[in-house]
């Protein structure tokens, strides 16, 4: 793995503002891609198992990924099981995406605190 994906060691200087912004943008793109792929998977499941239109599948999948819950009745057991599994998956993805977004800022704060406490 390349060093550009890793956070700097506590003994290294704090990243410049420009490099920090670049890191935050990269993490935002990763989180966005994760949510987009999850949304497409949810839409595919709703369209194939619940026989929903693309718009209804988008609504249901996005509501679950946003933590709100499904919208409307599901016509069969397979669709209901998919919705339950996708809801569990969506909850985990929400937490992972939030962690990916917050990690650079949290690391920067902790790194600055360590750098300042090391000065005499």
Image (cartoon, rainbow, N blue to C red):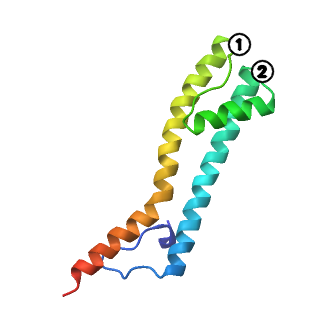
Please identify the quarter of the rendering in which residue 58 is found: top right
Residue 7, compared with residue 94, is above or below; it is below
Q: Of the residues under marks 2 and 1, which one precedes in the sequence? A: 2
Name the residue beneath numbered marker 2: 51
Identify the element where label 1 is drawn. loop
Q: Residue at x 54, y 80 (%)?
A: 18
Q: Are marks 2 and 1 in contact (CB under 8 Å)?
A: yes
Identify the element where label 2 is drawn. loop
Q: Residue at x 55, y 61 (%)?
A: 27
Mark 2 residue crowding within 10 angstroms, few (<14) / some (14–19) / many (20+): some
Going by the picture, which residue comes out furthest to the left? Answer: 120
Q: Residue at x 23, y 85 (%)?
A: 119
Q: Position of residue 30 (x, y in %)?
A: 59, 57
Name the residue beneath numbered marker 1: 75
Task: Please give the label number shown on residue 50.
Answer: none
Residue 114, compared with residue 105, is above or below; it is below
Mark 1 residue crowding within 10 angstroms, few (<14) / some (14–19) / many (20+): few
Q: Is residue 83 left or right of residue 7?
A: right
Q: Position of residue 83 (x, y in %)?
A: 60, 24
Q: How many marks?
A: 2
CA separation, marks 2 and 1? 8 Å
């Amino acid at each position: 793995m390349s060093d550009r994906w890793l956070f700097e060691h506590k003994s290294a200087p704090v990243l410049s503002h420009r490099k920090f912004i670049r890191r935050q943008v990269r993490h935002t793109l990763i989180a966005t891609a994760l949510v987009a792929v999850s949304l497409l998977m949810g839409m595919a499941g709703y369209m194939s198992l619940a026989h929903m239109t693309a718009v209804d599948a988008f609504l249901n999948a996005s509501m679950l990924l946003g933590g709100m819950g499904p919208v409307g009745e599901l016509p069969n057991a397979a669709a209901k099981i998919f919705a339950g599994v996708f809801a569990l998956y969506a909850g985990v993805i929400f937490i992972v995406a939030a962690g990916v977004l917050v990690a650079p800022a949290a690391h920067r704060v902790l790194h600055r605190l360590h750098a300042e406490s090391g000065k005499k």
